[in-house]
Amino acid sequence: MLEIEGFALSRYAAVKDAFAANFESGAELGARFTLVEAGEVVVDLMAGFADRKRATPFGPQTLTAVFSTTKALAALMIARLVDQGRLDYGQTVASVWPEFGQAGKAAVTVGQAISHQAGLPGFPGPIEPALWADWDAICAKLAAMAPMWPPGSASGYHPVTVGYIVGEIFRRVDGRTIGTAFGEDVAGPYGLDAWIGLPDGVEDRLAELQRPSALPEFGEINPATRAAFLAPWSSAAGKAGADYRRMEVPSTNGYATAEALAKVMGALANDGWLDGGEILSPALIAEASRERIRGQDLVLPFDMSWAAGFMRNPPTFPWGPGTETFGHSGWGGACAFADPERRLGGAYVMNRQGTALMGDARPRRLIEAAYD
């Protein structure tokens, strides 16, 4: 008999039914789904197991790796710099990171870089996978690299590299690493169980992943897709992978509960207010979430609308019907979203990974039940 912890307010009873159905179909190992409406947690459900042996329950203290959903946190941190007048989306990356202006990238703006238009989705030539654990070395290679397409002409998803680009922009402006700043300025003050880079002392709370048995469907493979996802050197591996997850790489290395992510996104859906404090002004929420570029992505097999670091819900609508909804999906199925029209934020995390690049059927079922 499936035991579901947590609650759903009565008007969201269908969400609990959909959550149970995901488990009954065999699609889940452990999972959690949280919704925040107008600043109030209205759904918080969890069930299953945190380990593949099915010995440890998936509970309120369970942390999960959320992979690219971390990019929503990175987008927030860059937006906070803009809100403070310390950075502008229209200024060039080279204005804060001069070395980045090499090889035809002098005109690339912060807004273009964070919306995957810089032409640096990965390295087309071999690198040692261990190099991903050397922040300065990766940043130097990206600064020296020629774009794989004319910057600003199209988007091409940068699954890993955008974290180094955004993180280095943040560090050059603020002086702190982006993970440290997130902890000190957002997660810590608001009691959020979320980190960029896995800290010491929480490993025993981290859910064990059940990897997918197949690769995602990338569509027609081109050089940009290969560099981003499929080259043997496109991500850290082996011992480098263990070292890498401790790094504050804000494209891939987020660790959080669904509740923490939902509270962040719920604040962005609620004029920036989180537990009585403002994490971002309404004007900057609108600026950070507006469309920067739209069209066929050169890496992902989708027609994409990109904001300043956020995926936008149109035209594929993975997060309900909202035309102003924005958020980010992560490898395996995790996602977090904000719907400012309905003041609704949500997040889904799990440890049995699927193969969908975006719009995994499990959270989609839960989100559709919530909107229904």
Image (tube, rainbow, N blue to C red):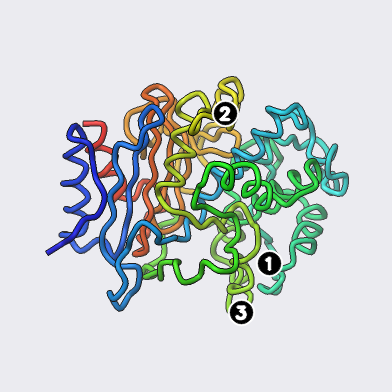
Q: Which residue is mark 1?
A: 132
Q: Which residue is mark 3?
A: 239
Foreground of the two, 124 or 32: 32
Which amino acid type is marked by label 2?
Glu
Image location (x, y in percent) of residue 10? 17, 35
> Marks 2/1: CA distance?
35 Å
Mark with earlier residue (2, 3): 3
Q: Secondary structure at mark 2?
A: strand
Quarter occupied by the N terminus? bottom left
The residue shown at (29%, 76%) is 55
> Marks 2/3: CA distance?
40 Å
Foreground of the two, 343 or 152: 343
Q: Secondary structure at mark 3?
A: helix
Density class for disc 1 (Cα within 10 Å; few <14, some 14-19, many ≥20) is: many
Callout 2 touching callout 1 (CB < 8 Å): no
Q: Quadrant of residue 364?
A: top left
Mark with earlier residue (2, 1): 1
Image location (x, y in percent) of residue 291? 55, 27
